[in-house]
Image (cartoon, helix red, strand yellow):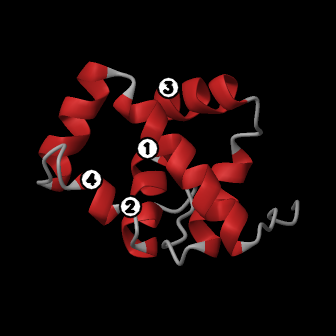
Amino acid sequence: MAKPQSINLQAAEDVAIQALSFIAGEPDELARFLTLTGLDSASIRGAAADSGFLAGVLDYVAGNEPLLLAFAGHCSIDPAIVDAARRALGGQTWDRDVP
């Protein structure tokens, strides 16, 4: 089994901010994200200062494989970086193979 990648906190925050920017650039995805989070577009900037919120952004991206792959392709990063960033920000880990 491959060892999970690791990433420092600043780099993790940068990935999360990039993910949030990516979501914001996709109107349908942004509307879905805002609905699920209960936020409005005016409150996102303030929420983005919280590492828990940033971990949630990455949870959102990681939980939607087409979105994850689109984001990773857009930023030219390995999709595994998103999971590493989630862990660095204190996001919960999960295993897709667990029933």
Q: Is residue 91 above or below residue 71?
A: below
Q: Is mark 3 on a helix, strand or loop?
A: helix
45, 22: nearer the viewer? 45
Residue 31 lies, in percent from the top left, at 19, 31
Mark 4–mark 3 distance (CA, rounded to whole Å): 23 Å
Q: Quadrant of residue 86?
A: bottom right
Which residue appears at 46% of the width and 65% of the height?
A: 55
| Location of residue 77 by image quarter | top right
Q: Nearer the viewer, residue 55 or 50?
A: 50
The amino acid beneath tag 2 is Ala
Q: Name the residue under label 2.
A: 48
In contact (CB < 8 Å): disc 4 and disc 1 = yes
Q: Which of marks 2 and 1 is nearer the N terminus?
A: 1
Q: Is residue 92 left or right of residue 30?
A: right
Q: Which residue is drawn at 46% across and 73% down?
A: 51
Question: Nearest the camera: 9 or 58?
Answer: 9
Amino acid type of the residue that numbered disc 1 sits on in the rendered structure: Leu
Question: In whole angstroms, how far apart are the C-alphas of marks 4 and 1?
Answer: 9 Å
Image mark count: 4
Q: In this view, does 38 lie to the left or right of 74?
A: left
Q: Do the residues labelled 4 and 3 touch (CB within 8 Å)?
A: no
Q: In which quarter of the image is the N terminus?
A: bottom right
Query: Which residue is labeled 3 in the image?
Result: 66
Tell me the CA gap for discs 2 and 1: 8 Å
Q: Distance of mark 1 from mark 3, alpha carbons?
A: 16 Å
The numbered disc on residue 44 is 4
Q: Are marks 3 and 2 in contact (CB under 8 Å)?
A: no
Q: Which amino acid does label 3 sit on?
A: Pro
Q: Are dots 2 and 1 in contact, CB under 8 Å?
A: yes
- Seen as rendered, the residue at the extreme right is 2
Residue at point 68%, 68% (across, down): 10
- Residue 31's disc is none
